[in-house]
Amino acid sequence: MFDLTNPIYHDAEKAREHLESLHWPVGPICPKCGEHENVTRLKGKSTRPGVVMCNSCRKPFTVTVGTIFERTKIGLHKWLLGFRLMAGSKKGISAHQLHRSLGITYKSAWFMAHRIREAMNLPAEGPLGGPDGTVEADETYVGGKARNRATRKPAKKKAVVALVERDGRARSFHVANVNAKDVRALVVTHIDRASALLTDESPIYTKMGREFSYHGSVNHSAGEYVRGVFHHTNTAENFFSIFKRGVIGTYHHMSEAHLGRYCAEFDFRYNTRNLTDAERTDEALNGARGKRLTYRQPASLAA
């Protein structure tokens, strides 16, 4: 049972026990020295629940040490509910909605959302594609239209490049410039060169396409979106359709400093689309360890 009436979303102790079951499946592990046998749970009346003493390095710790929850003043049950709401909202959930739903300040909700995105930013597991794989590459731009601006000045667009396996994973990145040099660095790093690469007619892919087993393209500017059954970039376009609905309908604005985290959020939900909301939430909670992020930490260092 993992619906919103689950006690882990309403009781801080139940939330801590659930987090321990995920992060310590075989018992407490000291985050400082890695000890897992010579540890003792402290149960004194003056000791807060969940504190464990490492008898090797003599340091007390809880399950939140070394995670995004370390030293938080917000109850763990609210954190878990925040994870559940973000993991289960296909197009994302705004900080204002978290602020209203969780009963915390907007400032806290905004920072909580970015911490959760950090937890969703899981390490890349090998390159996309392979000898029998097909990967589509495409780009889009995030930003308002000039006609919607009071000053009518051209809006600054932010570029996002997505690499999407057919029937597989997606990885999206914010890039400063959409040119052959910058995009190639992403493509050759994240796609197995034994893959087939499918793109649109953009000339930036012409030369790098020769580095893969096959490069096919469709000419969008001439109204060609599918040729046969193989040549298309509809998988990447479908990924962007969800991403853009999140931008337009939920977030409205994504600052350039944090755009990479928003990309990680949409990648995570896409890559776990075959899981239940419960399994997806637990997957994100597992990613919370080793990602301590302080409020004043620069975005460039935290990304």
Image: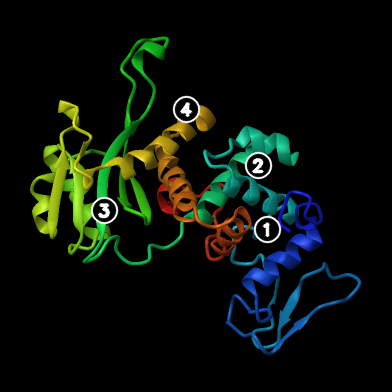
51 on left or right of 44:
left
Give the mark nearest the N terminus, 4 or 3: 3
- Is 215 rendered above or below residue 58? above
Q: Amino acid at mark 3?
A: Val
Which residue is the site of mark 4?
A: 248
Give the mark toward the camera: 2 or 1.
Answer: 2
Which residue is the site of mark 3?
A: 135
* Mark 1 vs 3: CB contact within 8 A: no
107 on left or right of 91:
right
Residue at coordinates 33% horizontally, 25% vertically from top-left?
156
Question: What is the CA distance from the residue labelled 1 to the residue labelled 4?
Answer: 34 Å
Which residue is the site of mark 2?
A: 108
* Few, some or many residues within 10 Å of mark 3 (<14, 14–19, 20+): many
Give the mark toward the camera: 4 or 3.
Answer: 3
Which residue is the site of mark 1?
A: 71
Q: Residue reaching furthest right?
A: 45
Question: What is the CA distance from the residue labelled 4 to the residue labelled 3?
Answer: 27 Å
